[in-house]
Amino acid sequence: MEETFSNQNQPKSKEPSKPFGAKIAQVSSDVFSPLLIPTYAMIFVMWLTPLLILPFGTKAWAAGGVFVITCVIPLLIIFCLIKLGKVSDTAISNRSERTLPFAASVACYVGAAWFMSSLNAPRWLTVFFLGAALVSLLAMIITRWWKISAHTGAVGGLAGIIFWLGQKNLILEDPLICLSVTIALVALIAWARLYLKRHTPLQVLCGATLGFSVELVLLNIA
């Protein structure tokens, strides 16, 4: 009895904390989630391209609208799918559960493109969101057989539009610095997804290549 009593009063051992690298990888994946990349892209184009001359209210409305359409609405859909038992977690770790969330993201990107068009935004900005919709559609199809990285697909698309803007001399700051920072971001997210063992090297590479190439091709032919 004494031994049992003493065991019950022993302090519970703390769970081992995550390695520092794992924390950095998880934070990077969360901060640069595919749901947030369109908003970051809008902030970039509204404050680092000739669109800077627009009134602050107009820029805030455009960026805020994109945030609601491409982040808030998809997140609410994911939560509803979790409640319905269609999705296991917000990260949608299970490949077989990704079809509906991807389909929702396609619809939301098309909605964002319509929103840009309704604001009489430059054609290239509307095309950017249509490109994001196409990237999501292709990723949805590929994911039925193979878990391509949505994270690197999103940052690859961001790199695509920044590269195109630099080509067209539409970046107000040094385009080389902007592109270098974006490439570093792609590398960071690729490392994070590999460190967390969410994808293979080929899956993160193909995701980034898909996002970059689709956006760049559509922007150049639009």
Image (cartoon, helix red, strand yellow):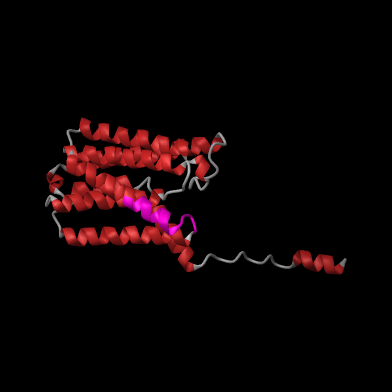
Q: Is residue 16 left or right of residue 76?
A: right
Residue nearer the viewer, 194 or 72: 194
Image quarter of the C terminus:
top left
Residue 111 lies, in percent from the top left, at 31, 32
Q: Residue at x 66, y 67 (%)?
A: 13
Residue at 25% over, 50% down: 160
- Tell me where the magenta segment starts and ends, as one range: 197-209
Would residue 32 be visible to someone looking at this image?
A: no
In the rendering, at what x and y percent does residue 124 appear? 19, 40
Point 41% across, 35% down: residue: 103
The quadrant in which residue 27 appears is bottom left
Q: Is residue 39 above or below residue 28?
A: above
Image quadrant in which you'd find residue 69: top left
Q: How many marks?
A: 0
Which secondary structure class fits the magenta region best?
A: helix
Toward the viewer: 48 or 171?
171
Rendered residue at 33%/57% (across/down) = 186
Q: Is residue 92 magenta?
A: no
Residue 121 visible in the picture: yes
The quadrant of the picture occupied by the N terminus is bottom right
The answer to whether residue 202 is magenta is yes
